[in-house]
Image (cartoon, helix red, strand yellow):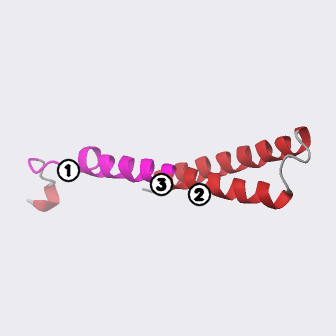
Amino acid sequence: MTLLNGMFNAICDQYGEGLKAFCTTCSQQFQGAMSDKQLRQARHSVSQLIDHDISSMFDNLESYLLERMLTIPESVVFSEDK
């Protein structure tokens, strides 16, 4: 699960940086279209939506991995369990 946590954090860092760069570019290219406060609020709202979507996707991935890939079949018996 440490791998999944690392992947999740890396993705959040990347989209956070991308969103920040996008907002910076928008404020430079379209000066006066939105106030700094409006831009911060918009960025926060979009960030919350992305956080929710990414969290849902990783929850689904974690469930899939735990149920289908990271389980030991009942037919497998380790020597220390005999």
Q: Quadrant of residue 82?
A: bottom left
Magenta residues, start to end: 53-75
* Residue tagged 2: 48
What is the three-letter code of the residue carrying label 3? Ser
What kind of secondary structure does the magenta stretch mostly adopt? helix
Choose top left, top right, bottom left or bottom right for residue 29. Answer: top right
> Which residue is the site of mark 3?
55
Q: Which residue is at a point 67% across and 46% down the rendered structure image?
A: 14
Quadrant where the N terminus is found in the figure: bottom left
Return the x and y of residue 79 as percentages of the image width and height.
Answer: 14, 55
* Residue 54 percent coordinates (x, y): 50, 49
Is disc 3 surrounded by few (<14), some (14 to 19) or many (20+) residues within 10 Å? some
Given the current orientation, which residue lies at the most extreme front position?
33
Q: Is residue 44 left or right of residue 55?
A: right
Decide if residue 74 is on the left or right side of residue 34.
left
Q: What kind of element bears circle 2?
A: helix
Amino acid under disc 1? Ile
* Membership of 57 in magenta stretch: yes
Discs 1, 2 touching: Cβ within 8 Å: no
Few, some or many C-alpha atoms within 10 Å of disc 2 (few <14, some 14-19, many ≥20)? Answer: few
Q: Earlier in the sequence, mark 3 or mark 2?
A: 2
Name the kind of residue labelled 2 in the image: Gln
Q: Nearer the viewer, residue 38 or 77?
A: 38
> Which residue is the extreme one toward the top?
29
